[in-house]
């Protein structure tokens, strides 16, 4: 079974600070996805990283896929209160017979204080 | 923007009762999924559905669970005889053919008393 471990589990910071969330596994993933989930809502896809070493930017969010495709990070620059939420990493299970079977990390709850 | 819609948003039921959770996937999507998230735990895959049959299911998806696409739009998850441990948020998702990019609904919160 492929597992994804996220750290930290909780992050409470002041507006304007930078932060990094990590997603690690002992298994290789063909791709990794980052989702953001707000209370009462389902996960919303932020980005998919596919190539080892890939870096993708989404405004103040920078996503990186490890060279060995076993880990990923999400870096937020100058965090704002609107960034508050649950951030999830997820990856497709290897050996599955269908698409869409994702393994999720346990999530990082980010709180940005004004 | 197209979205996946789920009903009900919250259902409270007694242990042993049958529950049906409903989902309307995005219209041009062909793959459909159910995931669940027990409070404080990870989002877990339950089942994937394509071409009117189950493609894959997890160990959680035992005989108490079933899925159906009764018409061209709805995708349902039925729990035959609910248990306390079935209390969770149930998320429906859909995707286009051959992609691991899923669009999730807002979820249905099931509370079993």
Image (cartoon, helix red, strand yellow):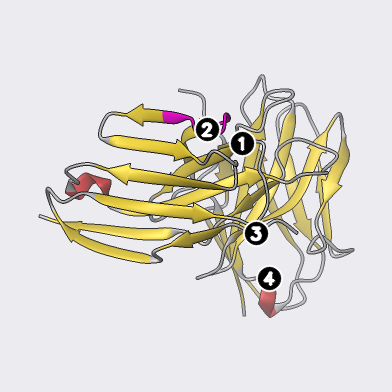
Marks 1 and 3, how far apart at CA: 14 Å
Q: Residue B13 location in percent, x, y?
A: 64, 71
At horizontal 54% and vertical 55% (from top left) the residue drawn is A24
Sort mark 1 into few (<14), some (14-19) or many (20+) by Cα contacts within 10 Å: many
* Kind of element beneath mark 4: helix
Q: Is residue B105 magenta-colored?
A: no
Crowd band around label 2 with a 10 angstrom C-alpha radius: few (<14), some (14–19), many (20+) = many
Task: Classify B103 as above or below B40.
Answer: above
Residue A3: mark? 3
Residues at circles 1 and 3 in contact by the CB criterion of under 8 Å: no
Instruction: Classify mark 3: helix, strand or loop.
Output: loop
Q: What stretch is highlighted in magenta?
A: A49-55
Q: Nearer the viewer, residue A23 or B5?
A: A23
Image label count? 4
CA gap between label 3 and label 4 equals 23 Å
Q: Which mark, residue A31?
A: 1
In the image, taking residue A55 as reference, residue B33 lies left or right, namely right
């Amino acid at each position: 079974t492929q597992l994804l471990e996220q750290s930290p589990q909780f992050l409470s910071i002041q507006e304007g600070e930078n932060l990094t969330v990590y997603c690690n596994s002992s298994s290789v993933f063909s791709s990794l996805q980052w989702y953001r989930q707000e209370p009462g809502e389902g996960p919303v896809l932020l980005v998919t990283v596919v190539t080892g070493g890939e870096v993708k930017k989404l405004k103040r969010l920078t996503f990186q896929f490890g060279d060995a495709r076993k880990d990923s990070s999400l870096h937020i620059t100058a965090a704002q209160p609107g960034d508050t939420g649950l951030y999830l990493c997820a990856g497709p299970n290897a050996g599955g017979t269908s698409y869409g079977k994702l393994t999720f990390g346990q999530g990082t709850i980010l709180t940005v204080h004004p | 923007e197209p979205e996946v819609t789920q009903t009900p948003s919250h259902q409270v039921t007694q242990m042993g009762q049958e529950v049906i959770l409903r989902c309307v996937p995005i219209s041009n999507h062909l793959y459909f999924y159910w995931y669940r998230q027990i409070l404080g735990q990870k989002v877990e895959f339950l089942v994937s559905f394509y071409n009117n049959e189950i493609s894959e299911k997890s160990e959680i998806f035992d005989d108490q669970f079933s899925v159906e696409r009764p018409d061209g739009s709805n995708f349902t998850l039925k729990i035959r005889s609910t248990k306390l441990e079935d209390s969770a948020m149930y998320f429906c998702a859909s995707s286009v053919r051959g992609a691991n990019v899923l669009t999730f609904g807002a979820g249905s919160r099931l509370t079993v008393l």
